[in-house]
Amino acid sequence: MPEIEFLSIFQGIATLVASEPLILVSRIALIALGIVFVYLGVKGTLEPLIMIPMGFGMSSVNAGVLYLSASTTGTLFIDPTASDPIQLLEILQIDFLQPIYTFMFSNGLIACLIFMGIGVISDIGFMLIAPFRCMVIAVCAELGTLLTFPIAVAMGLPYNEAAAIAMVGSADAPMVLYTSLLLARDLFVPITIVAYLYLSLAYAGYPYLVRVMVPKELRGIKMDQTTIPNITKGEKVTFAVITSTLLCLLFPVAAPLFMSFFLGIIIRESGVKQFVEFLGGPVLYGATFFLGLLLGVLFEASTILNPKVIVLLFLGITALLLSGIGGIIGGYIVYWASSRPFNPVVGIAGVSCLPTTAKVAQKEVHNANKFAVILPWAMGASISGVISSAIIAGIYVTLLR
């Protein structure tokens, strides 16, 4: 009977033992971090829709390293260097998750599917209640995406990478994925992971930012809901069609994002129940699930050892903090300029992750005054933030690609 070595059977342990000390420590740390993400997602501390699959993927891929040849290690989950369909068919590299990565992830399609789903669950009427005020707040909430760029350049990043990490300030992770795939493909995994990780943390931190910047008496301002106009279905569809066409004309490089988002809005207003349920359910949540899982699978030990990751971590939190501050400043601008009572807390919702920042705004207002309702205006600011973020992304990609 041939002699069987223990490590030849359990190759995950064998590759771990044979790794350089830094890789070994990194793999163990990422396995542990992935398990923590799953736990915090299940508990609800972090966003479960993304953190559960991402954490599970991180722990699995860093554990499941094996010998692909006598001198090469890797995983059977995915090979991010093989993205050409013809190449895949020739070498039969259809490993676990590889087709999803190749046909949906590496080309940004998965971001478009998520945007389509977001459009379906977004009521553009909230933005049309007060479009000028919403866009003022949204533009101010782009402070992080604008100021982080020169900060990143000053820290040594080239323009394309600086723009990609600056987009974390948009608080729109699919947008960050799309932009980083076009501008900084080598860093799109750590940049997108930084985006999702900090977004989960920012939603816990933004309430404290609101309390620091907005006194309780202003947080409790009641807004006049009798002034909310009735926006018809025809007005919503007309706005979506014209705005999408105009933005695609101005920024063709971001046209897939514009088209996906506004198409979702039109489908919502069309009332075609089958499409609404399909895009707002299986497409949106299925794409979100596989986005998280693939990010986790791509986050191998070698990724975290890139010296730029520390810089990206700093710049990501800087971008989100500046955007939150800018959004609240925008809320104050509208508060001072408006002839009707306006609650400046709406400004934090201009940081455009639907509907989380709008819910953060409403919760903080409710804590100050249980009779105050600002959710319609907050949702309008968030929807405007999606549009302004896509415009900034289009400008960055057009100038720097």
Image (cartoon, rainbow, N blue to C red):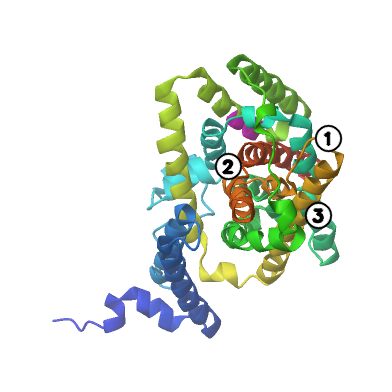
Using a 10 Å C-alpha cutoff, classify the residue at mark 3 as few (fewer than 14 neighbours), some (14 to 19) or many (20 or more).
some
Name the quarter where the N terminus is drawn: bottom left
Q: Which residue is mark 2?
A: 108
Q: Position of residue 279 (x, y in %)?
A: 46, 32
Q: Nearer the viewer, residue 66 or 210?
A: 210
- Tell me: 144 left or right of 220: right
Say which element carries label 2. loop
What secondary structure is the stretch in magenta mostly built from? helix
In the depicted structure, whether residue 276 falls above or below residue 157: above
Q: Is residue 89 left or right of residue 252?
A: left
Residue 105 located left or right of residue 350: left
Question: Helix, strand, or loop for circle 3?
Answer: helix
Instruction: Find the distance from the CA under tag 2 to the CA under tag 3.
Output: 21 Å
Please give the name of the residue rendered at 41% of the width and 30% of the height, measured from the top-left corner: 277
User: Residue 256 in magenta?
Assistant: yes
User: Is 266 drawn above or below residue 41 in the view shown?
Assistant: above
Q: Which residue is mark 3?
A: 159
Answer with the quarter of the image where residue 155 lies: bottom right
Instruction: Tell me the distance, in whole angstroms, between the alpha carbons under discs 3 and 1.
Output: 42 Å
Relative height, residue 31 to residue 146 (above, below)? below
Q: Element under label 1?
A: loop
Q: Are marks 3 and 1 in contact (CB under 8 Å)?
A: no
Q: Nearer the viewer, mark 3 or mark 1?
A: 1
Q: Is residue 23 left or right of residue 3?
A: right
